Amino acid sequence: MNKIIVLILLLIGFFIACTSSRFSRPGRVVSADDDMVCNNIISVAKPWLGVPYKYGGTDFDGVDCSGFVQQIYLQVFDIALPRTTAEMFDGGSYVRDGWLSCADLLFFKNVRGNGVDHVGIYIGNNRFVHASSSSGVVISDLTSDYYTEHFVGARRYY
Protein backbone atom coordinates (compact mmCIF):
# COMPACT_ATOMS: atom_id res chain seq x y z
CA MET A 1 0.00 0.00 0.00
CA ASN A 2 2.83 2.43 0.90
CA LYS A 3 4.53 1.69 -2.44
CA ILE A 4 1.35 2.63 -4.29
CA ILE A 5 1.07 5.92 -2.39
CA VAL A 6 4.74 6.72 -3.08
CA LEU A 7 4.25 5.89 -6.76
CA ILE A 8 1.17 8.11 -6.97
CA LEU A 9 3.01 10.99 -5.29
CA LEU A 10 5.94 10.59 -7.70
CA LEU A 11 3.60 10.63 -10.68
CA ILE A 12 1.82 13.73 -9.38
CA GLY A 13 5.17 15.45 -8.85
CA PHE A 14 6.29 14.53 -12.37
CA PHE A 15 3.03 15.82 -13.85
CA ILE A 16 3.32 19.13 -11.99
CA ALA A 17 6.95 19.56 -13.05
CA CYS A 18 6.13 18.88 -16.69
CA THR A 19 3.20 21.28 -16.79
CA SER A 20 4.48 24.02 -14.49
CA SER A 21 5.01 26.54 -17.27
CA ARG A 22 2.99 26.93 -20.39
CA PHE A 23 5.71 28.84 -22.14
CA SER A 24 9.08 27.27 -21.36
CA ARG A 25 10.20 23.70 -21.72
CA PRO A 26 11.25 22.16 -18.38
CA GLY A 27 14.88 21.13 -18.40
CA ARG A 28 15.48 22.59 -21.86
CA VAL A 29 19.12 23.22 -22.65
CA VAL A 30 19.59 26.50 -24.48
CA SER A 31 22.05 26.12 -27.32
CA ALA A 32 24.69 28.65 -28.34
CA ASP A 33 22.67 29.22 -31.52
CA ASP A 34 19.61 30.13 -29.44
CA ASP A 35 21.66 32.62 -27.44
CA MET A 36 23.09 34.11 -30.62
CA VAL A 37 19.63 34.48 -32.18
CA CYS A 38 18.26 36.12 -29.01
CA ASN A 39 21.23 38.49 -28.82
CA ASN A 40 20.86 39.44 -32.49
CA ILE A 41 17.17 40.16 -32.10
CA ILE A 42 17.72 42.18 -28.93
CA SER A 43 20.53 44.23 -30.49
CA VAL A 44 18.48 44.98 -33.61
CA ALA A 45 15.36 45.75 -31.54
CA LYS A 46 17.16 47.96 -29.00
CA PRO A 47 17.08 51.15 -31.13
CA TRP A 48 13.34 50.60 -31.59
CA LEU A 49 12.58 50.61 -27.85
CA GLY A 50 10.35 53.56 -27.07
CA VAL A 51 9.34 54.19 -30.70
CA PRO A 52 5.67 55.22 -30.49
CA TYR A 53 2.85 53.03 -31.72
CA LYS A 54 1.30 54.11 -35.02
CA TYR A 55 -1.29 51.98 -36.78
CA GLY A 56 0.13 51.00 -40.17
CA GLY A 57 3.55 52.38 -39.25
CA THR A 58 6.78 50.68 -40.27
CA ASP A 59 9.54 53.11 -39.28
CA PHE A 60 11.08 55.00 -36.36
CA ASP A 61 8.42 57.73 -36.59
CA GLY A 62 5.85 55.15 -35.47
CA VAL A 63 5.26 51.45 -35.88
CA ASP A 64 2.51 48.93 -35.29
CA CYS A 65 3.11 45.41 -34.00
CA SER A 66 3.23 43.63 -37.36
CA GLY A 67 5.31 46.40 -38.95
CA PHE A 68 7.82 46.13 -36.11
CA VAL A 69 8.05 42.33 -36.38
CA GLN A 70 8.43 42.66 -40.15
CA GLN A 71 11.34 45.11 -39.79
CA ILE A 72 13.18 42.99 -37.20
CA TYR A 73 12.83 39.79 -39.23
CA LEU A 74 14.07 41.53 -42.36
CA GLN A 75 17.15 42.86 -40.56
CA VAL A 76 18.01 39.73 -38.54
CA PHE A 77 17.03 36.92 -40.93
CA ASP A 78 16.55 38.65 -44.31
CA ILE A 79 13.04 37.15 -44.30
CA ALA A 80 10.13 39.17 -45.65
CA LEU A 81 7.11 38.36 -43.49
CA PRO A 82 3.50 39.01 -44.46
CA ARG A 83 2.31 42.51 -43.51
CA THR A 84 -0.58 41.77 -41.17
CA THR A 85 -0.75 39.88 -37.90
CA ALA A 86 -3.48 37.59 -39.25
CA GLU A 87 -1.39 36.72 -42.32
CA MET A 88 1.64 36.03 -40.10
CA PHE A 89 -0.47 33.76 -37.91
CA ASP A 90 -1.68 31.83 -40.96
CA GLY A 91 1.91 31.15 -42.10
CA GLY A 92 5.04 29.76 -40.54
CA SER A 93 5.27 26.50 -38.62
CA TYR A 94 3.11 25.79 -35.60
CA VAL A 95 5.03 25.84 -32.30
CA ARG A 96 3.68 23.57 -29.57
CA ASP A 97 2.98 25.08 -26.14
CA GLY A 98 6.09 24.95 -24.02
CA TRP A 99 8.52 24.69 -26.94
CA LEU A 100 9.30 28.34 -27.63
CA SER A 101 12.66 29.34 -29.07
CA CYS A 102 14.14 32.75 -29.63
CA ALA A 103 12.60 34.49 -32.65
CA ASP A 104 9.31 32.60 -32.50
CA LEU A 105 6.38 34.90 -33.22
CA LEU A 106 3.83 35.11 -30.40
CA PHE A 107 0.20 35.88 -31.19
CA PHE A 108 -2.51 37.34 -29.00
CA LYS A 109 -6.25 37.85 -29.44
CA ASN A 110 -8.65 40.63 -28.56
CA VAL A 111 -5.95 43.09 -27.61
CA ARG A 112 -7.45 45.80 -29.85
CA GLY A 113 -10.27 44.07 -31.66
CA ASN A 114 -11.53 40.65 -32.70
CA GLY A 115 -9.47 37.57 -33.44
CA VAL A 116 -5.67 37.42 -33.59
CA ASP A 117 -4.62 41.04 -33.58
CA HIS A 118 -1.26 41.36 -31.86
CA VAL A 119 2.20 39.86 -32.51
CA GLY A 120 5.58 40.00 -30.81
CA ILE A 121 8.94 38.22 -30.97
CA TYR A 122 10.05 35.81 -28.26
CA ILE A 123 13.51 36.70 -26.89
CA GLY A 124 13.91 34.03 -24.20
CA ASN A 125 13.28 33.84 -20.46
CA ASN A 126 9.53 34.34 -20.96
CA ARG A 127 10.11 37.79 -22.47
CA PHE A 128 9.06 39.17 -25.82
CA VAL A 129 9.56 42.42 -27.71
CA HIS A 130 6.61 44.07 -29.43
CA ALA A 131 4.96 47.34 -30.38
CA SER A 132 2.36 47.98 -27.70
CA SER A 133 -0.50 50.29 -28.66
CA SER A 134 -0.24 52.01 -25.27
CA SER A 135 3.55 52.17 -24.75
CA GLY A 136 5.20 51.80 -28.15
CA VAL A 137 8.01 49.28 -28.60
CA VAL A 138 8.68 47.52 -25.30
CA ILE A 139 9.86 44.25 -23.81
CA SER A 140 7.14 42.47 -21.83
CA ASP A 141 6.79 39.41 -19.62
CA LEU A 142 4.90 36.64 -21.36
CA THR A 143 3.80 35.19 -18.01
CA SER A 144 1.98 38.33 -16.90
CA ASP A 145 -1.72 37.70 -16.37
CA TYR A 146 -2.72 39.96 -19.26
CA TYR A 147 -0.60 38.22 -21.89
CA THR A 148 -1.25 34.73 -20.52
CA GLU A 149 -5.01 35.33 -20.84
CA HIS A 150 -4.72 36.65 -24.41
CA PHE A 151 -2.08 34.27 -25.78
CA VAL A 152 -3.24 32.31 -28.85
CA GLY A 153 -0.15 30.54 -30.11
CA ALA A 154 3.27 30.79 -31.71
CA ARG A 155 4.70 30.36 -35.20
CA ARG A 156 8.24 29.78 -36.41
CA TYR A 157 9.49 31.34 -39.66
CA TYR A 158 13.24 30.65 -39.60
Image (cartoon, grey):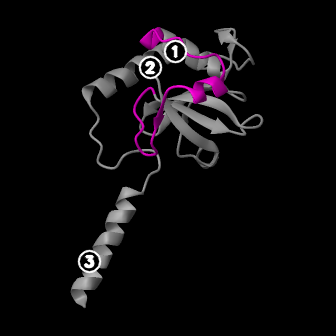
Q: Nearer the viewer, residue 104 or 132?
A: 104
Mark 2 lies on residue: 41
- Give the mark nearest the N terminus, 2 or 1: 2
Residue 112, given in percent of the width and then of the height, sits at 76, 34
- Give the mark nearest the N terminus, 1 or 3: 3
Residue 64, given in percent of the width and then of the height, sits at 68, 20
Q: Nearer the viewer, residue 148 or 42?
A: 148
Q: Is residue 129 left or right of residue 30?
A: right
Q: Residue at x 50, y 10 (%)?
A: 74
**Callouts 2 and 1 close, C-beta under 8 Å:** yes
Residue type (three-letter) at the residue carrying disc 2 = Ile
- Give the mark nearest the N terminus, 2 or 3: 3
Residue 102 inside the magenta-drawn segment: yes
The stretch of residues the image draws in magenta is: 75-103
Q: CA distance from mark 1 to mark 3?
A: 49 Å
Q: Nearer the viewer, mark 2 or mark 3?
A: 3
Residue 117, disc: none
Mark 1 lies on residue: 72
Residue type (three-letter) at the residue carrying disc 3 = Leu
Q: CA distance from mark 2 to mark 1?
A: 7 Å
Mark 3 lies on residue: 7
Tag 3's secondary structure? helix
Q: Is residue 116 left or right of residue 20?
A: right
The quadrant holding residue 100 is top left
Q: Is residue 108 left or right of residue 113?
A: left
**Residue lying furthest bottom:** 1
Residue 3, given in percent of the width and then of the height, sits at 22, 84
Tag 2's secondary structure? helix
Residue 97 inside the magenta-drawn segment: yes
